């Protein structure tokens, strides 16, 4: 295992692998496809999914990103109330907006709010109400 801490409990490691497998299958990806996206060999991904090995931390972060989940969920199975933002283009723009004048930020927030309301009205997004 390559984590800075030991995942000694085999059940934890097996459950971790099961969560990876489940999320991969939800996306209808083969092990080969996910392994390629992560930059690892398919047999290595198989070892993660079977609970035989834990990935190094950089691969753990990559897995969470590829599977659009949190590291916390992969490790513990506990889902956060908040979904992490995975669209890096969107995240970059939000970071850039922090440097705008307050009035411009408020305008952009109103525009985003209007688009959300429009999409809710059209039934395109199933956002929490």
Image: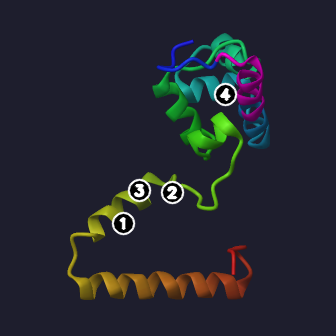
Residue bearing the label numbered 1 = 94
Judge the density around disc 2: few (<14), some (14-19), many (≥20) Cα neighbours within 10 Å: few
* Placement of the C terminus among the 4 image quadrants: bottom right
Identify the residue at horizontal 64%, vertical 61% (top origin).
81
Tag on residue 89? 3
Per the rendered image, the range of residues in magenta is 8-19
Which numbered disc covers residue 85?
A: 2
Which of the image's four quarters has the N terminus? top right
Residue 17 lies in the magenta stretch: yes
Label 4 vs label 2, nearer the camera: 2
Give the image quarter of residue 99: bottom left
Q: Secondary structure at mark 4?
A: helix
Q: Say above or below: 126 vs 42.
A: below
Given contact means CB atoms under 8 Å apart, are the residues at marks 2 and 1 in contact? yes
**Residue at position x 61%, y 46% in the image:** 69
**Image marks 4 and 2: residues in contact by CB distance under 8 Å:** no
């Amino acid at each position: 295992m390559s984590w800075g801490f030991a995942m000694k409990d085999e059940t934890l490691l097996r459950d971790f692998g099961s969560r990876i497998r489940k999320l991969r299958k939800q996306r209808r990806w083969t092990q080969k496809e996910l392994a390629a996206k992560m930059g690892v060999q398919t047999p290595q991904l198989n070892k993660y999914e079977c609970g035989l090995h834990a990935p190094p931390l950089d691969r753990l972060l990559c897995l969470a990103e590829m599977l659009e989940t949190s590291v916390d969920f992969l490790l513990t199975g506990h889902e956060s109330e908040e979904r992490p933002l995975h669209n890096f283009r969107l995240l970059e723009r939000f970071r850039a907006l922090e440097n705008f004048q307050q009035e411009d930020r408020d305008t952009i927030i109103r525009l985003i709010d209007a688009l959300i309301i429009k999409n809710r009205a059209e039934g395109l997004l199933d956002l929490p109400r």
